[in-house]
Amino acid sequence: MSRKLPEIPSASLADIAFMLLIFFLVTTTMDVDSGLERRLPQMPPEQEEPDDTPPIKERNVFAVLVNTNNQLMVEGEPMRVDDLREKAKEFLENPANDENLPEKKVEYVEFFGEIEIPKQPVISLRNDLGTQYGVYLRVQNELVAAINELRDKFAKKQFGKPYSSLEKAEQNAIRKIVPMKISEAEPKNVGGK
C-alpha cells in the first residue's frame, strides 16, 4: 500500500502575503524633501518703465561665489563653507560701522524705537553649473542660518524669547532690522565641466 504524503495547505498563503505587504507599506517611512523656502520676484509689468531705483552700492552687496570645483569665494577671498555663517552675520550686522560693510541708517522700528540698521544689505549668491547640489545647499543653509541667528539674537535681546515664538508684529519688526535678501544669480558655466 502506498501512503499519501500530507499536503501543505496553500489556501491561506495569498492572505498571509497580502497581510505582510500591508504591514511593510504601513511601517515603512518615506523620506520627504522639504526644499528651500524662497519667494520668487513678482512678474515685471508689461510696459517697460524707466528704472528710477537707485543702484545698490558695492559695499551693500555680500558676494558669494561657488565654482565648479565646489570652492567658495566670498568678497573676492577664498573661504571655507564652515566660516561663511560668521562672515555673513558680520556683514548683515556691521557692529563697528565699518566702511567696507553695508551703510547704516537710523530708522524708527516698532518695539525698538529709533535704531541704526543696515541700509539695503543684499547677499548675492552665484554658483557654477558644475557645482554639486550638496555644496550649493550647504552654502544656502549657512546664509539662511546667519540670518536666523541674528533674528534670534535681536528677539532674545528685546523680547527675551526666540524669534520663532514671537507674535507676528514682533517678527515683522525684527525682519525690518535683519531682512532676508538673498539674490541668486543664474548659474554660469565658468569651470568648464
Image (cartoon, rainbow, N blue to C red):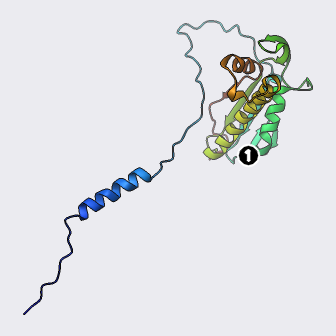
Q: Choose top left, top right, bottom left or bottom right for residue 97.
A: top right
Q: Which residue is rendered at x = 64% and y = 36% of the image?
A: 188
> How many labels were placed on the picture?
1
Please tell me whether residue 183 is drawn above or below residue 108 in the rendered image. Answer: below
Q: Is residue 111 left or right of residue 23?
A: right
Residue 41: horizontal and vertical position, in percent? 59, 20
Q: Secondary structure at mark 1?
A: loop
Residue under numbered circle 1: 71
Q: Is residue 56 visible?
A: yes
Q: Quadrant of the N terminus?
A: bottom left
Residue 77: horizontal and vertical position, in percent? 83, 39
Q: Which residue is rendered at x = 39% and y = 52% of the image?
A: 25
- Which of 77 and 134 lies nearest the eye of the viewer? 134
Residue 96: horizontal and vertical position, in percent? 92, 26
In the rendered image, the residue lying farthest to the left is 1
Q: Which residue is rendered at x = 52% and y = 9% of the image?
A: 46
Q: Choose top left, top right, bottom left or bottom right for residue 52.
A: top right
Residue 76: horizontal and vertical position, in percent? 81, 36
Q: Residues within 10 Å of mark 1 (few under 14, many from 20)?
A: some
Q: Is residue 135 left or right of residue 12?
A: right
Q: Is residue 76 visible?
A: no
Q: Which residue is rendered at x = 65% and y = 40% of the image?
A: 128
Please tell me whether residue 154 is drawn above or below residue 138 in the rendered image. Answer: above
